[in-house]
Amino acid sequence: MQFEIITTQAQLHDFVTALDNSPISLDTEFVRTRTFVANLGLLQVSQNKKITLIDPIAINDLSEFWLAVDGKNLILHASSEDLEIIRDHKGDLNFKLFDTQVACAFLNFGASLGYAKMVEILQDVIVDKGESRADWCARPLTANQLNYAAADVLHLQPCLEKLQQQLENKNMTRFFEQECQTIMDLKMKKEDPDNAYKSLNNLFKLDRQGIAVIKALAKWRLHTAKERNLALNFVVKADHLWLLANYRPASIDDLHRLHLSPSEIRIHGQTVLNIINAVEKQDESSYPPFIKRLVDFPAYKKTLKSMRDKITLCAEEHDLPIELIASKRIINEYLSWLWKLDDIQRERADRPKLLTGWRFELIGHQFEH
C-alpha cells in the first residue's frame, strides 16, 4: 500500500494546496488515558485514492489543514471520537459528514458495525486490526502502525459509494444525511457545567443538600479537568464524589476515613472541604430538587413496553435496527422530558431525539403529547 507521510509545515502546505473538492476520507489515531482532551497521534487522509498520513507530533500547527476541509464532504467511520478531536483542534465542524457506520445501520448491517467487518462485507477484504491498541503518540511509529493507519482510510470511499447506492434503493438517503448532521450538532452543543452532576450514578439516594454538594463538586471537577487537561477521574473519581455528597466530611481525617486516594486528598482535599462547607451554608431553598428515577414512576414499565412494541414493529417494517430508531437511552430521554418537566420547562428544553427529524417522521409522532 502506497502512502505519503507529512512531517513538516512546508509539506503540509503543499498537501493542502493540492486538495480539491472531492470527498475526503478521514481518520484519527489518538491517546486518551489521563487527559481531558485526546492527544492526537496521527491524522489519516485519503482523497482521489491518494493516502496521506499527517504527523501532528512533528507538525504543531494543523490549522491550515483544518481550514482546508471547510465545506468539504468528509467520510468517517464511527465518527464520534474523531469529531471531538476535530472540534477541539478546528473549533467547529463546518463540513458535511458521511459516517459509514451510520450508513451501515440504516441498511441493517448492525447498529454499530466495525470498520473491519464493513470492509469484509462490502469489499471482501480482511483488514488487520492488530495495532488498534498501539501508543500513537510514541515515536518512531513502526511500519506495521503506518500500514494499519493507512488501511483505515483506504476503503472508506469505495465502501461509501456502495452504501449510498443501497441507501438510495432503500429510500433512506435523506434519513442517513439527517442523522449525520444530528451527530455533528450534538458534538457542537455547549455543555452546561451546572449539569455535569446529572450523568453521575445513584443521585436518587442523596438528600437535597447532598444533591447540591455533588452538583457543586461536579462543576468544580469539570472546570479543574479542563484547566489541567486531566481526565475527570484523575481529578476525583466519580464514586468518591458521591461519597463526599452523601457523608459531607468536615476534615482531612474524614476524607481519609472515606478512603479517598492520597493524591485526591493531597491535591484537592482542602478545596473539596471548602466547597462542601459553602454549600452547607446556603439556604436550603436553593438546593436542587430530589432526583426521581424513571423506574420509580408507576407507569414506567408499562409505558416502556408499549413504546418498545411500537418501535419494534416500526423497525421490522423499515428493516432497521431497533437501537438505531430508539435505544433505551433515547426512550428514557423522551420519558424524562415528558414526565420530569412541567409545561414551561418542556417548552424551554430541547426536544428529545425521538421527537425530532427522521425519528419523529418514522415513529415519534405516535408519542407526541
Image: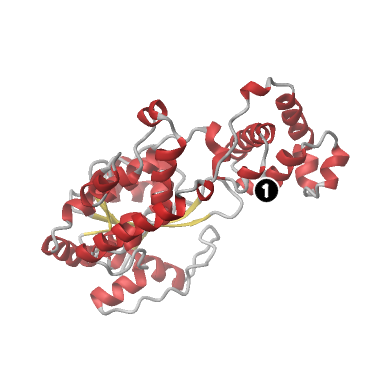
Residue 218: x and y in percent read: 62, 37
Depicted 183 relative to depicted 338: above or below: below
Inspect this view and state whether residue 77 appears: no
Left or right: where does residue 327 sit relative to residue 249?
left
Depicted 258 relative to depicted 107: above or below: above
Residue 151: x and y in percent read: 34, 69
The residue lying toward the viewer, choosing from 261 and 108, is 108
Inspect this view and state whether residue 5 appears: yes
State the residue lying farthest toward the left: 169
Residue 334: x and y in percent read: 38, 44
The residue lying toward the viewer, choosing from 39 and 257, is 257
State the residue lying farthest toward the right: 253
Q: Quadrant of residue 311?
A: bottom left
Please identify the quadrant where the C terminus is shown.
top left
Rate crowding at label 1 as few (under 14), some (14 to 19) or many (20 or more) other CA atoms within 10 Å.
some
Color theme of the render: secondary structure
The residue lying toward the viewer, choosing from 50 and 360, is 360
Depicted 157 relative to depicted 195: above or below: below
Residue at image position (59%, 30%) is 288
The residue lying toward the viewer, choosing from 244 and 75, is 244
Residue at image position (68%, 20%) is 283
Q: Amino acid at mark 1?
A: Lys
Residue 104: x and y in percent read: 27, 65
Q: Quadrant of residue 115?
A: bottom left
Depicted 183 relative to depicted 339: above or below: below
Residue at image position (63%, 21%) is 285
Q: How many marks?
A: 1
Please identify the quadrant where the N terminus is shown.
bottom left
Question: Label 1's element?
Answer: loop
Residue identifier under label 1: 237
